[in-house]
Amino acid sequence: MLKYILKRFGFAIITLLIIVFVVYCLVAQFSKNPFAEKLIQKQNEGGSNGLTQQEIKELFDYSVQYHLIPKLNFNEVQTTWTQIKLNPIIRFGYWIQNLFTNSENPFGAPFDLNLLKSTGSSTIPQYFFRFLKYSIIITLPAFFISACLGITLGIVAGYKRGSALDAGINFFALFFIALPSFVIAPILISILFSLNFPPNFINFNNPVEVEAFGVGKMVLSWLPPILIIVLGSLSGYITYTRNQVVTVLTSNYILIAKSKGLSRKEIFFKYVLRNISIPLAAILIPSYIGLLTGGIVIETYWRVPGTSQVIAQSFPNGEINIIMFSTVFFTSLSLATSILVDVSYTLLDPRIKYTQANPYSYLRFAHAYYQREKLFKSYQQQIQEGA
């Protein structure tokens, strides 16, 4: 078991490095130099528009400091440095080096330092986690509601397959699968406006808003975005659970259990629930990561100051350090949950073992091939010498 977990952690680290490398290179290749863009914008407005030579030199120095351009002599590239870009692979090397050598701010600093000052943060992780709690407020309750309700309805539909109740639950699930959240959200907003209830997310960290609206209205303002997320994710749980229940109920061991005279309750807890719990565990925890990272539509409509807004605003501004921290954080979280799901299999079904090693080894095959080739060449040499 321990050997398997260590192996999974090893593969997770390799996967994380590959994803981080690919994301960094893509963002570095296609994002623009914000300091060069600032200079070009000022020049297009008319001359230098008040930018002195010293200010232009500062923009150049910032570009070198953030490894956006190579270290060059400013006097030699004074008119062309805005068109120069440092190789993304070299930039990635600098980013990795800063990650291990800069103990105070390993993920670097944003290009716009006002982002940190506006929230009272000193590092990118502090800045990011200040917004993460707002995303959790609307996604965590939505996850528990949709998971519990979806699994319950899926089990009912599986047991009542072919009935009117099953058809109604399936219609409900397919309807909200086909209807995306960015369509449901405006409809709900129109309904809220007709009820004189503006679709605004009341921030619990803002004492002025809390005092003006009260705790009751504050909690009530969180319900519409939670409802949209529930409706969007509920259908997946219903459909998946129903399919698993139908598969188990039509299996041979359920027929044998019925022939032994076991009650519906005993069959459900001993066979159905045990067998559907393993595939459900494989989707439950990872699905919450998807909810946490994919709420940009909901956060935009309800003005929730969550992480989706931070990530969405970082891409057009080229804030690669914020993008990379969010990539490392969410990728690490996803890989950790996948390992947690694998470990949970043994808790749900003790018959599952991870101790058996894979009998097929590429190193073993390569070694055997090398030994055969070596033996074959020695035989050929003996034959030639005998001839």
Image: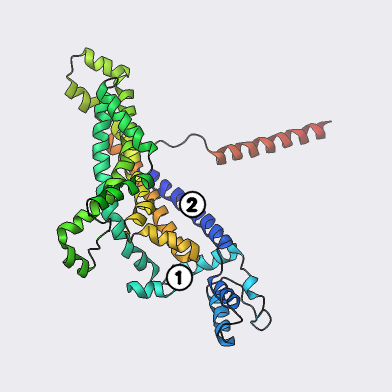
Query: Mark 2 or mark 1, which is nearer the start of the sequence?
Result: 2
Q: Residue furthest top?
A: 259
Where is residue 171, by image quadrant?
Answer: top left
Q: The residue tagged with tag 1: helix, strand or loop? A: loop
Q: Residues within 10 Å of mark 2 (few under 14, many from 20)?
A: few
Give left or right: position of 355 versus 193.
right
Identify which residue is drawn at 30% across, 46% down: 228
Please give the label number shown on residue 298.
Answer: none
Image quadrant containing the N terminus: top left
Residue that label 1 marks:
108
In the depicted structure, whether residue 88 falls above or below residue 182: below
Identify which residue is drawn at 27% across, 40% down: 147
User: Which circle, 1 or 2, is nearer the viewer?
Assistant: 1
Q: Nearer the viewer, residue 210 or 72?
A: 210
Where is residue 365, by image quadrant?
Answer: top right
Residue 34 rendering spot, x and y as whole percentages: 53, 71
Residue that label 2 marks:
14
Identify which residue is drawn at 35% across, 40% down: 283
Question: Hey, what amino acid is under mark 2?
Answer: Ile
Give left or right: position of 103 versus 220.
right
Can residue 365 be seen at all in this image of the molecule? yes
Residue 340 rendering spot, x and y as whole percentages: 33, 45
Question: Hey, what amino acid is under mark 1?
Answer: Gly
Q: Residue furthest front?
A: 194
